[in-house]
Image (spheres, helix red, strand yellow):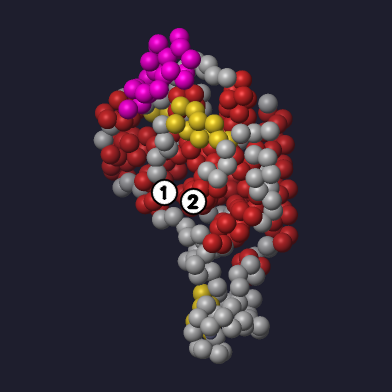
Amino acid sequence: MEEIHLSEEAFAYQSLQNFLSKFPNEEACLKLFPTTCKACGHKKKAVASSARVINCSRCKTKTWRTADTYFQGLRRLMPTLAWIWLHEDRAVLSINKFAELFDIAYATAWKIEARLQAVLENEMDKHDVIELITSVFDPVIQKRSIDSTANEHPVYEDDDNQAQVQEQENLDEDQQAIRAFLMPQPVEFDNLFQVSGLPIGKFSAALACLELEGIATRHAGNKFSLTKTNPALLIGTQEQEVLRRFFAYIKNLHGISRKYLQRYLAAFWARVGVNRWSKGTFLKSCMKLRRLSYGEILDYNSPKKLRVPYTD
Ligand SMILES: [Zn+2]
């Protein structure tokens, strides 16, 4: 198993090298954006390579080259472009590593991935999917308690997921916010704090409550994970094969939460689906879209029935 993960990482680094040889700096990234005046359509020929704004010599209007694209208002184009590149190459890299390599905060790297996953989810919905209930993903995203009768029946019948609903009701808003970011793998206190968006006092108090409730587990080095349970898995062979591959894919990442499960499935789809993306198509989609706000990312919740891609 370990060998597979290592080669996945080596592949990701190779992909990143290819990206950097084509886009070694911000100026190189800017070349992707047109130098055409948005007001009159006049194409400016001589533009300084670092110019983000062009002044039209014909109509005197200023145009931001990244305007009306996914990249509008982004201070640095490179991290997002690199992440898109990796997705198109179907390379898998953890958010931690990504943050480290581009010298950005974990929270920034996390937001880049979360926003791109939203694009991928839209794209995935244009294709055929299998629907699976949320509890079949328990091996990678643990919930606190599991109805023992669920182990005796095919999970298709376990449709209302009571334990999950109950748990959510007992938690206050702050606790729920942190709960959404807890993963089966231990996450550092600081990283959890950063993504939670809470003030430190409220964050510490809510995290302590989650620990007392048995939802969060504290590990050495001030790390926290979601407390684990071991539910049974009874589904058809095709679904099992997709799940097996999804779980293997997830192992290469830092970990995932139930809240964003659907979007991780979309990211998975982008990597395992047959001919889903050819080089440049993901970037092309992004060029036409606007980025989600942080609020829009936080408001997201995966549906109870997860849409899972068909794989070859
Ligand atoms: Zn003009």
Quarter placement of the C terminus: top right
Residue corresponding to mark 1:
297
Q: Is residue 62 above or below residue 74?
A: below
Marks 1 & 2, CB-CB < 8 Å contact? yes
Region in magenta: 145-165
**Foreground pick, 113 / 88:** 88
Q: Is residue 152 located in the magenta-colored stretch of the structure?
A: yes
Q: Position of residue 171 (x, y in %)?
A: 28, 32
Q: CA distance from mark 1 to mark 2?
A: 7 Å
Q: Is residue 117 above or below residue 40?
A: above
Label 2 crowding class (10 Å Cα cut-off): few <14, some 14-19, many 20+?
Answer: many
Residue 170, image quadrant: top left
Residue corresponding to mark 2:
115
Q: Position of residue 178 (x, y in %)?
A: 36, 38
Q: Tag 2's secondary structure?
A: helix
Q: Position of residue 190 (x, y in %)?
A: 43, 43
Q: Is residue 241 located in the magenta-colored stretch of the structure?
A: no
Residue 278 seen in this snapshot: yes
